Image (cartoon, helix red, strand yellow):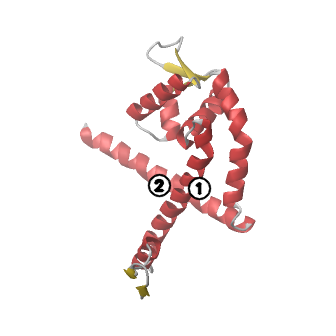
Amino acid sequence: MINKTNGPSRPSRKDFYFNAIKGRPSAEVFHGIFCVYSLLEKRMDEFFRPHNLTPVKFNALMLIKFMGQGEGISQNDLGYHMIVTPSNITRLVDRMTKDGYISRVPAAHDRRVNLIHITPAGEEIIRTVFFGFSEMIQQSVYLLERQEVEQLSGLLMKWFFKLEAVMEGSAATASKDSK
């Protein structure tokens, strides 16, 4: 196929990748999830940018607010629920503290433990963006029919729990092997 302005045309990257994996269900699933995530991440980045937020910061704020329930959440628990390494959670907490969204307080029961609390500025940013973010998610998800959304949700959760069990089993096995 010849493109008059640029000479011979080539398939788009998207077409190339989808054709390369066609007929390989595991690759199709993995690539499909990656593509959907990439588009959703771009949409979230665009949504949060005017508010000096990122999807990661928003997720952390929501976890601190709802899991901490006014008592705070340990930095370790926050990292566990966000599925990130201790060094990554430390950098995130440092940035969010600098932004004024959270505060770090040593736990009364163990001064080695930092409890993360949401600040009034963090509460305000959640109030500012929450409903718009929720609407954007609804619009993105309900491009599918409700029955498809329910089916997809069930399959993803089933896969998550099975994969998590395998990963925890691998960690337990690795821990035994290192002793």
Q: Would you say 15 lies left or right of 128 here?
A: left
The residue positioned farthest toward the front in the image shown: 5
Estimate the x, y position of residue 2 in percent, counting from the top left. Answer: 41, 87
For image coordinates 52% across by 12% down, the residue present is 109
Q: Which mark is residue 12?
A: none
Q: Residue at x 32, y 40 (%)?
A: 175
Q: Is residue 41 left or right of residue 139?
A: left
63 or 47, nearer to the observer: 47
Q: Residue at x 54, y 61 (%)?
A: 36
In the image, farthest residue toward the left:
178
Residue indicated by mark 2: 163
Q: Earlier in the sequence, mark 2 or mark 1?
A: 1
Question: Could you tell whether 72 is left or right of 94 in the image?
Answer: right
Where, quadrant-wise, is the C terminus in this rendering?
Answer: top left
Q: Position of residue 121 (x, y in %)?
A: 65, 24
Residue type marked 2 = Leu
Instruction: Count the labels in the image.
Output: 2
Amino acid type indicated by mark 1 = Met
Q: Residues within 10 Å of mark 2 (few under 14, many from 20)?
A: few
- Residue 51 occupies which quadrant of the picture? top right
- Residue 90 horizontal/vertical position (percent): 43, 28
**Picture disc at residue 157:** 1
Q: Look at the picture and state if 78 lies above or below 131.
A: above
Q: Nearer the viewer, residue 81 or 11?
A: 11
Against 119, residue 111 (above or below) is above
Q: Secondary structure at mark 1?
A: helix
